Amino acid sequence: MTDWTEIWRQLYEANSRTKTVGECACLWNSREQALEFLNMSLENPERIELILSRVPVTKESRVLDIGAGPGTLAIPFAQRARAVTAVEPAPGMVEVMREQADEKQVHNLTIVGKRWEDVSPESDLKGPYDIIVASYSLGMPDIDAAIDKMQAVSNGQIWLFWFAGTTPWEKHMAYLWPKIHNSPYHYGPKSDTLFNVLYQKGIYPNMTVHEMNYQKRYQTLDCAVSELRRQIGCSEEYDMLIRKYFKDKVIKDNSQLVENAKTVRVCMWWDTNRFPQRDIHLRDFS
């Protein structure tokens, strides 16, 4: 029988070897980078609005937001819910989330500055939770254990959001990586693998598919080239190649350059009371 958890791990690890910035959270160690991410999210509110409109948070809900980033969901969740716990490992993201909470006078938000894999449910969390959300934050090698931990602290619904198909940033890597590193680019696991992981665990989630606009702004083409060079992990000798490839991927918008594209995203959710997982105890994660 196919082991979908192992397939997820293999895809994750192969993709990780094409990342030059290490763990995903390392991208957002600085406050400046976290603010840039927050501003990009606010300029492209479609993802946030979709999640806020769909996830049934009420004034009595206890919510867990895994991979909360700068609080783009955790803050509005807290404004609607009884209490919110946000798990976020990146120091820059945590700093910006605290600033956002202070600015909006949100006092029912608890921030756990750890990776989900390192969280201890007994000492770090205040569960069980009515709603658990992981919004594009499933960059974890052991997805089986990650979901088991979610199940263990849930007494309601789990909502997972992930990608389908090739994203715009992956298209850039797929073209440039082989030309620069002389090896194929490996895609990370997508929503088809995630669905099969859940199905193999006896969880049959509801699922919807959404096409969304993707927009990213750059001050100059040089800035875009520099960012792509950092992602690919190459020297300035490849700037001409990157510039030639990317220059027709952006359009002029006032004083900036804008990349416009599409992404396909999948939402999966289920009631943990309807699909209880195998015998899981909190001590298993301590």
Image (cartoon, rainbow, N blue to C red):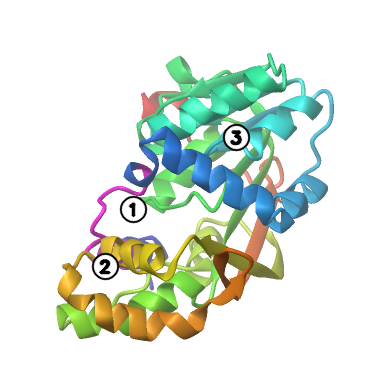
Q: Please say whether residue 15 is one of the residues in the magenta stretch.
A: yes
Q: Which residue corresponds to the image point at 39% horizontal and 30% vertical from the top-left?
A: 91
Q: Which residue corresponds to the image point at 43% horizontal and 33% vertical from the top-left?
A: 31
User: How many callouts does the rendering have?
Assistant: 3
- Residue assigned mark 2: 232
Amino acid found under the numbered disc labelled 1: Pro
Q: Nearer the viewer, mark 2 or mark 3?
A: 2
The label shown at residue 141 is 1
The label shown at residue 67 is none
State the image quarter where residue 115 is shown.
top left
Secondary element under disc 2, as helix, strand or loop, is helix
Amino acid found under the numbered disc labelled 3: Gly
**Vertical placement of residue 128 versus 166, above or below:** above
Q: In the image, is 154 to the left or to the right of 13?
A: right
**Vertical placement of residue 245 versus 124, above or below:** below
Residue 163: horizontal and vertical position, in percent? Answer: 55, 66
At label 1, counting other C-alpha atoms closer than 10 Å, the crowd grade (few under 14, some 14-19, many 20 or more) is some
- Residue nearer the viewer, 250 or 206: 250
Q: Nearer the viewer, mark 1 or mark 2?
A: 2
Q: Which residues are magenta?
A: 10-25
**CA gap, disc 2 to disc 3?**
28 Å
- Residue nearer the viewer, 169 or 131: 169
Residue 137: horizontal and vertical position, in percent? Answer: 49, 49
Amino acid found under the numbered disc labelled 2: Ile
Q: In the image, is 225 to the left or to the right of 44?
A: left
Residue 193: horizontal and vertical position, in percent? Answer: 47, 68
- Residue assigned mark 3: 71
State the image quarter where residue 97 is shown.
top right
| Label located before the other in sequence (2 or 3) | 3
Q: Nearer the viewer, mark 1 or mark 3?
A: 3
Q: Please say whether residue 162 is one of the residues in the magenta stretch.
A: no
| Label located before the other in sequence (1 or 2) | 1
